[in-house]
Amino acid sequence: MESSATKKQSKNVLVIDDNRNDLLMVKFVLLKMGFNPILLDNPRQTIDLLQMHNISLIVLDLEMPELSGIDVLKRIKRVDAYKNIPVVMLTGHSAFEDVKKAVSVGATDYIVKPIDTGIFENKLNKIIKSDGQNTDWIEYEVKELSDSEVQLYFTSHIISIGETSLTLKASQMLPVGARLFTNASLFKKLEIKNPALKVEHCEEKDGEYIIRCTVLGLSESDLRKIRLYHQLLSPASGNKTAA
Amino acid sequence: MVDFINFFNQFESIQSEKLNELVTLGVELEEDVLGQMLTLFRESTQEIIAQLHLKFQHKENKDISALAHQLKSSAGNIGLKRLHQICAYLEKGIKENSLDTNAISSLIVLVEREFLSTMQELKQFEKAA
């Protein structure tokens, strides 16, 4: 336990909440986990704080009277240097629409207050372990597991893309034939808006699922963009999204 | 008022497992986690209750809802289940416009009563811990 705590000591976690009681609670749990909590009760100072510290993860309250968590999240995601920092939203209720809104703006996960320390630790450890690389999501589903826990499903990473196909790695299996939509950043970069996917094949590998999908409904112009993307990829660059 | 009291009495006042969790956390961190949480809670709640009365006099229901939201979360952190529920009811009721002035007034009185009675109980728990 001590070595794990020492290893994580260098990781700064920024906690933004206007409620000092919640800040104190999160501080103690983060200290127990071996992180270095940086507490902020004024969300307007978020970007200043990010400039001053090397932050590995942000815990952000959704409901703040001065500036909402969604607005803070949008500000963070607008800055290239910070947009990949995973953000976990905290809120007093588990309204699915709030969860969806937060995730669609770029939140990595969502924790319901009052904080259940077990759920909090599990979620944060999982995110830190994955290095926050779950920003490319495939249409998600939100499930309420208990009063204090909601779970997002179908978060996945694109591991390769072909002209009309896509291979994903996910923590859950998806049934063959399922149709989904993706908001993956790769498509955003290519200016292809939320293409539909159809699951063609799904197999388990080392506890994760490799899912091959067909990309549906691409226009000629979309296909040209994907072809151009492939041409621009240098084989030596080792880009993981190369087909 | 009586209806409210009966309704909220179905919830336990203090969840001792939540308090024990804070005591354990304190042991692991070698800090008085419970003591610090309770001190901050006492101070901030006294302020919130004073604000609730003030906002009620000025009929600023939106602010009452925001204050209830804040107290709901703080109470939940230290296992004050009943206070958490009263605040949740007050917050939601104002947001949904389902509470009249009398109901809001009764709930604010209930918040204060519950706070004062749980503080007594928590003192005993703190001593024992």
Image: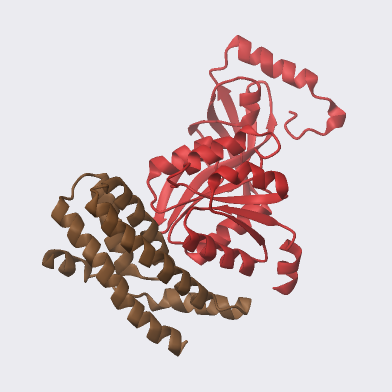
Chain colours: A red, B brown
Does A181 appear above or below A203?
above
Is residue A13 in view? yes
Residue at (72% x, 32% y) in the render: A241
> Quadrant of the rendered structure where residue B38 is?
bottom left
Does B120 appear above or below B114?
below
Q: Position of residue A35 (x, y in %)?
A: 67, 62
Considering the image in quadrants, where does the C terminus of chain A appear? top right
In this rendered view, identify the residue nearer to me: A55 or A134.
Answer: A55
Does B92 appear above or below B123?
above
Residue at (72% x, 48% y) in the render: A52
> Is A164 placed left or right of B110 in the picture?
right
> Is A171 placed left or right of B105 in the picture?
right
Q: Position of residue A164 (x, y in %)?
A: 63, 22
In this rendered view, identify the residue nearer to me: A40 or A128.
Answer: A40
> Is B3 placed left or right of B36 in the picture?
left
Considering the image in quadrants, where does the N terminus of chain A appear? bottom right
> How many circles with numbers are drawn on the protein?
0
Q: Position of residue A112 (x, y in %)?
A: 44, 55
Q: Position of residue A82 (x, y in %)?
A: 67, 40
Residue at (50% x, 45% y) in the render: A153
From this viewpoint, which residue is outermost toward the top?
Answer: A220
Is residue A170 in view? no
From this viewpoint, which residue is outermost toward the left?
Answer: B2
> Is A235 placed left or right of A9 in the picture?
right
From this viewpoint, which residue is outermost toward the bottom?
Answer: B128
Residue at (39% x, 83% y) in the render: B123
